[in-house]
Amino acid sequence: MLVVALDGVPFTFVRRLFEAGELPNLRAIAERGPMAQMDTSVPNVSSVAWASFMTGMNPGKHNIYGFLDRHPGTKKTYIPTARDVRAPTILDRLSQAGKRVFSMNVPVTYPPRAVNGLVIGCFLSPNLEKASPSPEVYEVLQGLGYQVDADPWRARRDKADFLPHLVEVFDARMAATRHFWRQERWDFFMTHIMETDRLHHFFWEEMETEDPRFAPAFLDFYRRVDRALGEIIAWIDDDTTLVVLSDHGFCSIRQEVHVNTWLAQSGYLSYTTDAPKGLEDVSPSSVAFSFDPGRIYLNVRGREADGWIEPGPDYDRIRDELAAALAGMSDPDNGAPMVERVLRREDLYTGDAYAAAPDLVLEMVEGYDAKGPFGKPELTFKGEALVGMHTTPDALLSISGLALDAKRPHIIDVAPTILSRLGVAVPDEMDGVSLGDVVPVRG
Amino acid sequence: MVTGHPADAGFTVWLTGLSGSGKSTIATALASRIAERGLRVEILDGDEVRTNLSAGLSYSKEDRDANVRRIGWVCELLSRNGVVAIAAAISPYRAARDEVRSRIGRFVEVHVDASIEALEARDSKGLYRRAREGALTGLTGVDDPYESPERPELTVRTDGGETAETSVSRIVAMLEELSYLAPAAASQAAADVAYTEDEESEVTDRLRDLGYL
């Protein structure tokens, strides 16, 4: 089985390009395995989405809720990594079943866990050496010019300079994919392309508005990815199942929304300093704080460092009041509603890692991108560098030999489908359900 | 190594010492250090056990020994099935502890030691004050005996100098030395923190530039 993960590639956008006669190889893939629009995790950031994919479980079990979290009972924050993924991944399960596995760049696989095969860490790796499972692999990757991730700072400094850099990172990623695919006959091989997501973050709006400086380069990048897919199709034989998927959709940012600023302005959050930088500066009397994207944590006694809200009726009452207020958040420029829905933890998560879950999660109106910094003076912000944001219902999935058209898959359904295809029992603890029997496609 | 939990990975760490000496604190921190090694771990805390497994038992010598045997029995089942069991219980009588030790085999005893004066001064649960006021009788170390271990694998002192973190590091080092845990270098991928401070700030900058924070 060969899995190609295209980070942040929207189903609807790909369909639009198909209609315009673009992406012939991806279209051919979609003919072998009808492509479906797929739902993703809440929140819809890559670390949560891919951890959900890798485990077939909801965050309440795998414990990854975002790119930042806090140690229980403290104001110390950390970046969740593979170390914090509390559930076995499909790599672990396939390894245990004696299958040879390869995985490259899939969030959240840093630090690489020991498997029956190779794991090359994701963009959360601090450097290439630490992304590599062994000195030998490090040497190979270095020789291919492989980079853990494109440098986003270059996009912030000069967008025109970022594009060739992105191409270089993508080409090296493909070179490494080629190298390790040829190395042995893997039972499960997965490569993850982050560059599409990076392209979208910095150029989605320019693409949508057909900005002559960047829109053609945007399309060229997609053509480059499609050519790579053409090469990949040529590698595989009839017995190899090809899976192509993304982890979320994309849209243009109208405004970035500083949720902590709204909490502070509305009297729910205060700080111990005039220039707050992080959770450590949140005052003990605060009701709630937020982490990206739209995760809201109440100051609950016994859970947060200075928690005072009693679990039970007090918690319910305060949370209901806060949820109602959050639902009314509006754009200060024009009064437009910014929040689609306010979701409660018990409606989203279940499992051993439930205690760490946010109390509320904001589902924003498309275009309003909930952000997590502390102490920003302005509630909303429209920058020129970051112009694209994730959406939840528009990921894509294609599995060769599996008719998906009538189904509405969720990203947690892919892991059980993969296990069944490879003849490995699907454990009861997985939340996803197998999407059906995959039949080999001939010819 | 394929991620998995071989049945022979299990063992029991038995923390014994007076009330308030820091057994629970050490147990919690030790559990997370062991979990970081990829091992499954459970804590049996004396205070909690008395609300379920040993509910109804008194503080007589017989019942205290019965409590220790029950905790020991659960530790034995866990250890036998590849889980690291950490018991945090006063367990005042030497004979009962030794009995549990010989049943389990893969067993290390850690004496969490603090002077009664220090414990009275700290008195985190208010027990020593109540004992002195006569509102509580049978408090170990005050009017009930505590038999210190004669040959514990390790003694940690929690009444000055040594922080809980240091105590835990000494226990981990002892477990490595006795081959219950793989030496840190060999289990580096699992034992090290994911990031050094510099690395974490570098990755944080990258996440910020991507608008993910």
Image: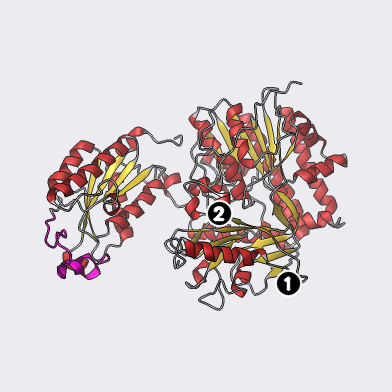
Amino acid at circle 1:
Pro
Residue A345 badge: 2
Amino acid at circle 2:
Arg
> Depth check: A151 or A264 in front?
A264
Please say if A371 is above or below B94: below
* Chain at tag 2: A
Task: Determine if residue A165 is in view.
Answer: no
> Depth check: A16 or A431 in front?
A431
Among the 4 quarters of the image, the one containing residue A173: top right
A419 on left or right of B124? right
Task: Determine if residue A443 is in view.
Answer: yes
- Are discs 1 and 2 both within one chain? yes
User: Residue A86: where, in percent of width, then height?
Assistant: 48, 45
User: Residue A14: where, in percent of width, then height?
Assistant: 79, 43
Q: Residue furthest top?
A: A442
What range of the chain is rendered magenta? B121-146
**Residue occupying image coordinates x 17% and y 49%:** B64
Task: Give the residue at mark 1.
Answer: A332
Please state, as top left, top right, bottom left or bottom right, where the C terminus of chain A lies in the image.
top right
Q: Does the magenta portion include B125? A: yes
Q: Magenta stretch: dominant SS?
A: loop
Q: Does the magenta portion include A344? A: no
A348 on left or right of B210? left
* Chain at tag 1: A
Residue B78 badge: none
Mark 1 vs mark 2: give the one in front: 2
Q: Residues within 10 Å of mark 2 (few under 14, many from 20)?
A: some
**Residue occupying image coordinates x 20% and y 42%:** B69
Q: CA distance from mark 1 to mark 2?
A: 28 Å
